[in-house]
Image (tube, grey):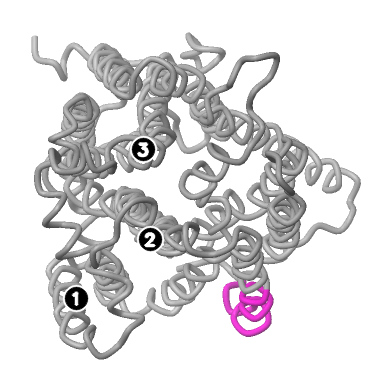
Amino acid sequence: MTAAEATPEWDEVTDKAFLGHPKGLGYLAFVEGCERFSYYSMQTLLVLYMTKYLLLPEHFGGVIGLQWLQGAYFDGKAGQPLSSAIYGEYSSLVYLTPILGGLIADRWLGRRTTLLAGAIVMAIGHFLMAFEGLFLFALLSLIVGVGLFKGNIASQVGELYGPKDLRRAMAFQIFYIAINVSVIIAPLISGTLGEKVGWHWGFGTAGVVMVLGLLLYIKAGPWLPKENRTEQKAASVAGSNFPILLGTAAAVVVLLRLIAPSVPAIAAAGISGQIGFGVAIGLLASVAPADRPRLLALLLLIPILALAMLTNQQIFNAYLNWADTQFQLTFFGVTLPTSYMITIDAALSFTMLAAVALYWKWRSDKGAWEPDEIGKMILGSFFVIAGGLCLYVAALTQGSGKIGLFWPVMFHLFNSIGFSHIMPVSLALFTKVAPKAILATVVGIYYLTFFAANKTVGIVGGWYSTMDTPSFWLVHVGTAAAGLVGFVLFKALIGKRLDGDPA
């Protein structure tokens, strides 16, 4: 009997083996939890590992290709600025490659095969981190692996349910609970091992958990929805013209490379930033003419979102370096790992996401006024500004001792409330405005927000070691304020054009 024949047929409504949901949801939630544990273990340790170990003179020379890359691409940066630049490239590219991963899955390999390949490549990348000489190869493996994995698991959650199954919304809430739990515990386990026992123990733990996720996904096979590769390919072809996308993106990148020497802003973006912009223009050119006005509006929203989210994304970069050296993390003679600050942030983010959702539901049930999506983003920007000001005050009032945790925790609280009004709301807006024929493409475009934000974080974070700390955080307050102005202008000039149902 073939694998397809062995796949059980379940009733879309009566399969309630996992918390009242299909058994496949349980597997997918745990697999995604394993992947996010591994990713955020890496994300939490990466900058601290580089600044406190890998980029020190006694280790730097042993990393294959790093000296060449330092001179050829990073303009000779060293120490913390180089760490920030590498972090910016890595953390931005992991949000660019899912577009390619989605295309590979839709047009050639299918979601299951592509996801399996991504999990294997990611696990290899985590284990390569145990060998400091292979550091750049590890990052490359993780960038490719996340691209193949990330865009191809959430779509399988939706496919577990029929179009009229009302459990779908709750299924995604369960799915994202698994993500948030993983983000909370990853710093506690991998962070503690990495900082207290040895860096490679932390990275190795991430690899082991990724392998566990891979094995769970293989075991889940019989409980996952069947794939219709013919329909998937036809939908992908109808959604966008791949040759036009690729050709336009390549032409834009070549043009930007040619003019970069005479335009400092383009040169500062680097090859990854130029590729990201080329992909955005390629996507715009590849869709049907009738879909372009809405797509263009969403593309214009991306840099505004990136500015608004800059402070949040800096948490994994310069903020950790600052916390490591300037925060009072010793209690009763025990020094806590710096990575625990990520757990504090994740716990508050999880709580505020739930609290904000419940608050607006409460107002809606009362029939009270509720702002639209852009209105909520405007409101969220005020909280992000307040969070940035907490960091500014903490740096300004530090004195000769170390910084207590009051102002940092207040930052995480205000920033989490702001993030709850911006990130999930903006994703909802993208899926609402997207022409239905290219919904998957638009979700890929949404990830360009994180690409742009993290690319900028890498550049701005490099200023930390040369700028006085209060001014450094005041810059982030300024970017949040710029995002606020951008949202207001977007709502005034473009917002009404997005009303109505997409084609």
Q: Nearer the viewer, residue 115 or 133?
A: 133
Residue with the mark numbered 2: 455
- x and y percent of residue 112 in the render? 21, 31
Please state which of the two labelled residues, at mark 2 or mark 1, is closer to the viewer.
2
Circle 2: residue type: Lys
Q: Label 2 crowding class (10 Å Cα cut-off): few <14, some 14-19, many 20+?
A: many
* Dot 1 or dot 3, earlier in sequence: 3
Q: Is residue 155 left or right of residue 496?
A: left
Q: Secondary structure at mark 1?
A: helix
Asked if labels 3 and 1 touch by Cβ distance under 8 angstroms, the answer is no
Q: Which residue is mark 3?
A: 46
**Counting other residues with Cα less than 10 Å from the Cα at mark 3, is it few (<14), some (14-19), or many (20 or more)?**
many
Which amino acid does the dot numbered 1 rest on?
Val
Judging by the rendered image, the residue that carries numbered circle 1 is 253
**In this picture, is 49 found above or below 373?**
above
What is the magenta range? 485-499
